[in-house]
Image (spheres, rainbow, N blue to C red):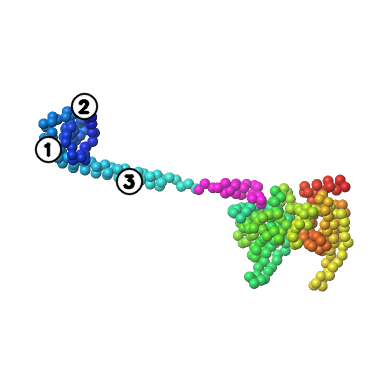
């Protein structure tokens, strides 16, 4: 018969009171543990059957002797575990406190805005949207309207509208309200370049502008406008968003469009009487483009008597209003700057090529 012998390196706790045999010499082991000196071997012989009774009687005494030491050891172990846990928490807290402050990592969009704002190119107008902040643009004023005042149920106020274009040819409409209109009204001149910042980007109302941009700008007293000394010749004087003459037919009445075409017919200049008793000159000009479609454009005021209109020359109109008069026609803007006799645009090459082929 085989017997298994176990040697314990820590205090032994007896958990079964029905033990009938005591193996080894636990008393010697306890003594050696106090001095941290252990014998090379112990007498682990199994007692004779005759000594079982005596051993059984001593079992209770052994248990009683070991119990306080076991309780003390367990208590010490629990305290050590708690101390280790507290120490770990303290170390972690110290590491957090000693960790240097780190700024949050900027998003890709924020890095782009900062990079562009600090560069010579500034923020391209095409990258402006409702979420863009801390932007600065460099643009030319292609159109400046007179300051207009209003008085309605919501109150009174004034506004100044301007059209802007940057060196990439992207246009956008901007509006100065109330005090800002007075502050910058005399400073801003049509055709000049400026740096604009501290404005607001909003959704554009396409009904009141021909500029193909989903957004517009609004400015107030916090806005900053700085003149550009060199005037930057890289920024063109005008920006167009041309619509093919053939496509005007599908547009709604009063829509605003830019068109370009060759003059195929010049009407006579005539004066009409207005409701207020005044008169105004008007003239119908027929233009056509490579879609082989023509349309009448009515020009008004001083522009109607201009001698620059020549049959066969290419002309561009900005901000024309679609009219249902005589089917479909266009009313040109009364602003002279919206009519361009010298256009540098890829669309002009197409029209010239079409004209030469006929």
**Which is in the foreground here, disc 1 or disc 2?**
2
Say what secondary structure mark 3 lies in.
Answer: helix
Disc 1 + disc 3, Cβ < 8 Å: no
Residue 304 coordinates in the image, percent (x, y) = 84, 61
Q: Are marks 1 and 2 in contact (CB under 8 Å)?
A: no
Q: Residue at left 65%, top 52%? A: 137
Q: Is residue 190 left or right of residue 53?
A: right
Answer with the quarter of the image where residue 273 lies: bottom right
Which residue is depicted at the point 63% across and 58% down? 202
Q: Nearer the viewer, mark 1 or mark 3?
A: 1
Task: Determine the secondary structure under disc 1.
Answer: helix
Q: In this view of the protein, which residue sits in the foreground, 208 or 97? A: 208
The residue lying at 73 percent from left, 57 percent from top is 210
Residue position marked by numbered label 1 in the rendering = 57
Q: Residue furthest front?
A: 1
Of the numbered discs 1 and 2, the one sitting upstream in the chain is 2
Residue that numbered label 2 is attached to: 1
Residue picked out by circle 3: 86
């Amino acid at each position: 018969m085989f017997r298994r012998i176990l040697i314990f390196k820590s205090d032994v706790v007896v958990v079964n009171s029905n033990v009938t045999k005591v193996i080894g010499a636990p008393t010697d082991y306890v003594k050696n543990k106090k001095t941290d000196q252990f014998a090379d071997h112990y007498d682990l012989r199994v007692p004779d059957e005759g000594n079982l009774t005596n051993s059984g009687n001593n079992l209770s005494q052994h248990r009683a002797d070991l119990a306080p030491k076991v309780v003390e050891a367990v208590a010490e172990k629990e305290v050590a575990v708690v101390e280790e846990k507290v120490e770990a928490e303290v170390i972690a807290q110290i590491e957090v406190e000693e960790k240097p402050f780190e700024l949050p990592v900027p998003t890709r969009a924020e890095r782009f805005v900062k990079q562009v704002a600090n560069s010579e190119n500034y923020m391209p107008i095409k990258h402006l949207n409702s979420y863009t902040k801390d932007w600065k643009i460099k643009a030319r004023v292609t159109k400046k309207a007179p300051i207009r005042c209003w008085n309605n149920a919501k109150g009174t106020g004034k506004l100044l509208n301007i059209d802007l274009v940057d060196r990439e040819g992207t246009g956008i409409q901007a509006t100065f309200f109330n005090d800002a209109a007075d502050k910058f009204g005399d400073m801003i001149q049509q055709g000049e370049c400026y740096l604009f910042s501290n404005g607001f980007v909003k959704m554009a109302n396409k009904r009141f502008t021909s500029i193909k941009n989903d957004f517009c700008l609004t400015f107030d007293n916090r806005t900053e406008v700085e003149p550009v000394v060199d005037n930057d010749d890289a920024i063109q004087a005008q920006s167009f968003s041309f619509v093919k003459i053939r496509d005007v037919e599908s547009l709604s009445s009063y829509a605003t469009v830019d068109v370009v075409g060759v003059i195929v017919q010049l009407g006579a200049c005539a004066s009409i009487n207005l409701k207020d008793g005044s008169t105004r000159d008007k003239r119908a000009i027929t233009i056509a483009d490579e879609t082989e479609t023509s349309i009448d454009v009515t020009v008004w005021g001083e522009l109607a008597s201009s001698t620059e209109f020549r049959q066969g020359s290419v002309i561009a109109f900005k901000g024309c209003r679609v009219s249902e008069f005589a089917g479909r026609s266009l009313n040109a803007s009364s602003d002279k700057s919206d009519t361009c006799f010298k256009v540098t645009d890829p669309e002009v090459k197409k029209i010239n090529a079409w004209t030469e082929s006929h």
